[in-house]
Amino acid sequence: MPATLKLSIGQHSDAGRKETNQDFHGSLIPEEPLLSSKGATIALADGISSSSVSHIAAESAIKGFLTDYYCTSEAWSVRNSAYRVIAATNSWLYSQTKRSQNPYDRDKGYVCTLSVMVVKSNTAYLFHIGDARIYRLSGGTLEQLTNDHRIRLSSHETYLARAMGMNQQMKSQATNEYWMAMVPGLGMSPLQQAGQVGGGMQSMSALPQFKELAGRS
């Protein structure tokens, strides 16, 4: 008898050092047959602090993915489905900036990071653009699984190189395993953030290779 996928998801977001919380997060564990054909999804977006509309971008990116991903063809792979949805959302966000009062200033546009995990069967697929991070928490140790899409000019100066809505076309980072998403700016270490959400919020049973998973902050 095949093992049954079981997920427990915990979510928390805090403005941290910022005056307003520009994060948005969401998750969806669908009923069968979608759970088997498409999997469960957890997603996190963080709007850029220089834009007064980036919280709208973050909310749109998450709601768009959680809705549209499950409308893609069952014949498409997880990667193909996710890429198409992310690309469509990116184009929409970019067009919103072009229609705004600051069409040529992306620092004031509909721009946000996006990190998504899709868990299907015994595999977790990660999709990532920006500097929010996905970690694996195991045995009290965090392993960062995504690269920060930032360009470093000096030891004190960096800037975001990739984000949703930043350019008309985009490329995300995709991998096939593990998980814990966090956003920068909370003023605490990743391990401290993990403690804030009560380590091990996201867990799977009946899958020996995925015994210890973590939630998001």
Image (cartoon, rainbow, N blue to C red):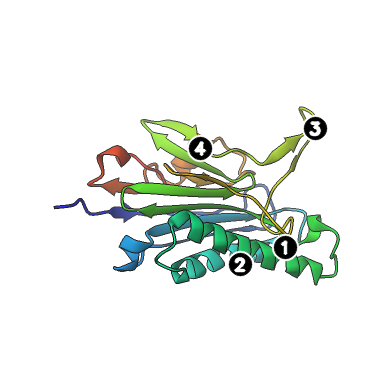
Is residue 11 shown above or below 161? below
Return the x and y of residue 185 as percentages of the image width and height.
64, 44
> Which residue sits at x=40%, y=48%?
124
Q: What residue type is labelled 4?
A: Leu
> Which residue sits at x=53%, y=64%?
65
- Are the residues at dot 4 and dot 2 in contact (C-beta closer than 8 Å)? no
- Mark 4–mark 1 distance (CA, rounded to whole Å): 26 Å
Residue identifier under label 1:
110
Tell me the number on the disc at residue 145.
4
- Are the residues at dot 2 and dot 1 in contact (C-beta closer than 8 Å)? yes
Front-most of residues 133 and 15: 133
Return the x and y of residue 169 as percentages of the image width and height.
70, 57
- Mark 1–mark 3 distance (CA, rounded to whole Å): 24 Å
- Mark 4–mark 3 distance (CA, rounded to whole Å): 23 Å
Would you say residue 127 is visible in this rendering? Answer: yes
Residue identifier under label 2:
60
Q: What residue type is labelled 1?
A: Tyr
Residue identifier under label 3:
153
Tell me if mark 1 has few (under 14), some (14-19) or many (20+) residues whose alpha carbon lies within 10 angstroms of its own: many
- Numbered-mark total: 4
